[in-house]
Amino acid sequence: MAIGFHQLEEKRLLTLSFYIAGAFVVIAFGFAIATHSGAILFDAAYSLIAFVMSMLTLKVANLVQRPDDDRFHFGYTAIEPTLNMFKSLIIIATCLYAVISSINSMLAGGHAADYDTGMFYGVIATLGCFATSLYMRFKGKNLVSDLVKVDAHTWLIDGVLSASILLAFILAYVLQSTQYGALAPFVDPVLLIVLGLAMLPVPAKILRDSLNEVINKAPPEAVSTVIEKKLKKTLGDVPYEHVEVRISKRGRDIYLLVHIIVDDAFSIATISELDAIRLKCEAEMREWEPAIIMDILFIQDPELAE
């Protein structure tokens, strides 16, 4: 598929996410006021974060499509992991705040809510969030876009949050009519504590992966080995002693700095022959992985590759 299709599809998905997030903000805050539920208020705050982040994501999606210029010599793709890192930090802070406030609420005797209305909200929010996440995952599976992937993760987290609220409200509703009715006010804060702690691993992983890209850390050894093996296959006609490859991932781009240490049998008559090798190698690598960007240097002294 053409690159233009990927750009348009990415923008369409992110725009859809933006409008749905805006709708959920209004719905969630409305139900939070109606039910006096801290859990729904937390869900509303999460939706508000998703809405604000969607605005930034749309802006970044346009920026990363730009070619390099005088201000950004290596293009704008490094902004992508920076945004994802920022988004994950806000989600982590929100989860920790929810846990702390819920502990205080439990110490104060719990918090009652309108569980009937809360269950109705839980059904709407759960179905809506999971449907949005699945749709973005399905439509974005062939796109080279971390923005769409992280957005799908964000909706998945929101869906789990909404489903947990629904189950907790069902439990509280049942408890009200039993001899354990005094425990019902504790369901809402306990739910927030469980959700806040359970959700932390997902944004923590996004934060770790995004930070690795921001600081230009090399990908895992298993990934590097596959890339190096594929690269060496493209150099089958080139007599060399060793190939030194440095790899970094910046957003949707995978950058390779390749030093080919040639042996004595390597001989060329013109610079255009080197260009032909570079073009052939890069074409085969990009056919295998379109996100790859390469710089290839031919040297004879191994120290120059260090």
Image (cartoon, rainbow, N blue to C red):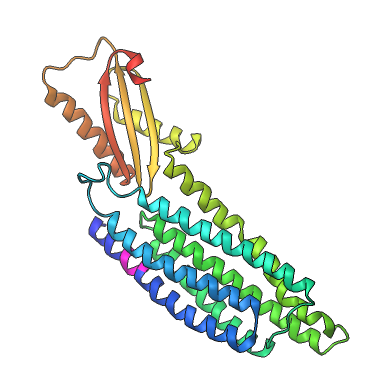
Residue most extreme to the right: 179
Q: Main secondary structure of the magenta part?
A: helix
Does residue 58 lie above or below 185 as drawn?
above
Numbered disc total: 0
User: 299 or 79: which is nearer to us?
Assistant: 79
Q: Can the viewer see residue 190? A: no
Position in image of residue 106 (x %, y %): 77, 72
Q: Can the viewer see residue 39? A: yes
Tell me which corner region of the image, top left, top right, bottom left or bottom right, holds residue 35. Answer: bottom right
User: Is residue 220 found left or right of 276 in the rendered image?
Assistant: right
Q: Is residue 121 magenta?
A: no
User: 303 or 70: which is nearer to us?
Assistant: 70
Q: Which residue is depicted at the point 75% across and 76% down?
A: 187
Q: Which residue is depicted at the point 51% across and 83% down?
A: 27
Position in image of residue 52 (x %, y %): 43, 69
Tell me which corner region of the image, top left, top right, bottom left or bottom right, holds residue 102. Answer: bottom right
Q: Which residue is depicted at the point 51% across and 57% down?
A: 88
User: Is residue 290 found left or right of 269 in the rendered image?
Assistant: right
Position in image of residue 151 (x %, y %): 45, 63
User: Is residue 160 found left or right of 230 in the rendered image?
Assistant: right
Residue range of the region highlighted in magenta in the rendering: 10-14
User: Is residue 69 found left or right of 117 in the rendered image?
Assistant: left
Q: Which residue is depicted at the point 18% across and 25% down?
A: 274
User: 91 or 232: which is nearer to us?
Assistant: 91
| Screen quadrant of the C terminus | top left
| Screen quadrant of the N terminus | bottom left
